Image (cartoon, rainbow, N blue to C red):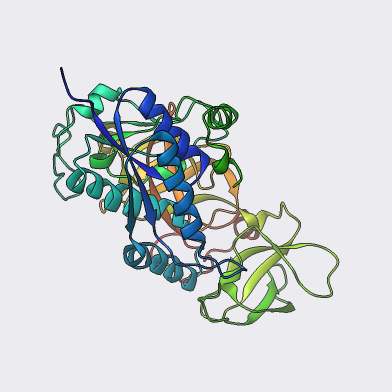
Amino acid sequence: MQAARHVVCALSGGVDSAVAALLLRRRGYQVTGVFMKNWDSLDEHGVCTADKDCEDAHRVCQVLDIPFHQVSWVKEYWNDVFSDFLNEYEKGRTPNPDIICNKHIKFRCFFHYAVDNLGADAVATGHYARTSLEDEEVFQQKHIKRPEGLFRNRFEVRNAAKLLQAADSLKDQTFFLSQVSQEALRRALFPLGGLTKDFVKKIAAENGLHHVLQKKEYLQPRPGKFISIEDGSVLGTHKGWFLYTLGQRAKIGGLREPWYVVEKDGTTGDVFVAPRVDHPALYRDLLRTNRVHWITEEPPAALVRDKMMECHFRFRHQMALVPCVLTLNQDGTVWVTAVKAVRALTPGQFAVFYKGGECLGSGKILRLGPSAYTLQKGKSKPREATEGPRDGPVL
């Protein structure tokens, strides 16, 4: 008789990962729970919140009668996630640390710890997502180190795992998994991929997991001015340009009517604003990413063959998917041309690409094309941003 498959499940102390571990036990697997401490922080009462989460995760393991391990990746989180977060803000971009954390901590540090130290046949998390592989296919995967380079051998992994959207479209978290490596994805299980959040809560309540149902200043201010994009007049002052992201309402003292952030100048610290939530200065249909992380292929065969490919993208979790055309550059970056102008495209966020329910991968937004307002005014040279190389359309 074959020994039970060993699955190491990441536990956060919350309901989703707790139910994921429970469901894995029900499938007959040997399950080990691991809590990752990635941050040292105190709440308003001076209590370390990570310690409370760790206690909740440990209690889950006691209820399920499974082994419990705690690991600390505070240093790795600081170096790979938080430092990047600060650097992006200092460049005037709006970062997404959740995507970077999944890439470097949960699906690199945790993955290798589970496989190399605990002898896992597979890893699991409480994310709402699915892959194209059945459990037994996951267990049959073997480690294959992927070579570096832009155009990698498409046949090195004959049964590559596709990242698929969850059954519950409102809870789908493929957006946050869009930078996960193929190596880790092929060995990952997502027990909640076919469930709704309400059903997950019901499972927790019915299985003694009630306790999981209850559940900073690092940048120096750089003052600047609020400037009207329409006539260049100074409307007020602010405490730091990195506090604002494109599209958000700017709180300008003494003004009754709302104004919205449309551009930022990292050299002067000025924030350009426009009246009206639908001002044309907020709309663009062109962006450029850094080198894209493709989940199954590097890059997709159709994109390599035709140099262009139709698909959909989003840059915020749960926003409606936007039809677009990708144009591949020689360095692995892509131009993304939206079929219709999109409001508040934001440098630093990730453009996550989808096709037919599959998450293809993502790239960080580094540059933006001219706004509809700039085009309407007939300007031949758009305002330059501080981020990214200085060729092609910019913010």
Using the image, determine if residue 127 lies above or below residue 247.
above
Residue shown at the point (36%, 28%) measured from the top left: 25
User: Which of 362/16 is in front?
Assistant: 16
Q: Find residue 158 and report its horizontal and vertical position in percent.
A: 17, 27
Using the image, determine if residue 259 lies above or below residue 254.
above
Q: Quadrant of the N terminus?
A: top left
Tell me where residue 88 sits by quadrant. bottom left
Using the image, determine if residue 357 lies above or below residue 241.
above
Using the image, determine if residue 67 lies above or below residue 249.
above
Residue 278 visible: yes
Q: Find residue 361 and report its horizontal and vertical position in percent.
A: 36, 42
Q: Find residue 217 and report its horizontal and vertical position in percent.
A: 55, 75
Relative side of 270 to 123, left or right: right
Q: Find residue 61 and report its horizontal and vertical position in percent.
A: 40, 41
In the picture as drawn, the residue positioned furthest to the top comes out as 1
Relative side of 65 to 112, left or right: right
User: Which of 294/283 is in front?
Assistant: 294
Residue shown at the point (24%, 50%) measured from the top left: 113
Tell me where residue 178 sits by quadrant. top left
Relative side of 208 to 392, left or right: right
User: Which of 274/318 is in front?
Assistant: 318
Residue shown at the point (42%, 66%) measured from the top left: 82
| Picture mark count | 0
Residue 347 visible: no
Residue shown at the point (19%, 48%) measured from the top left: 117
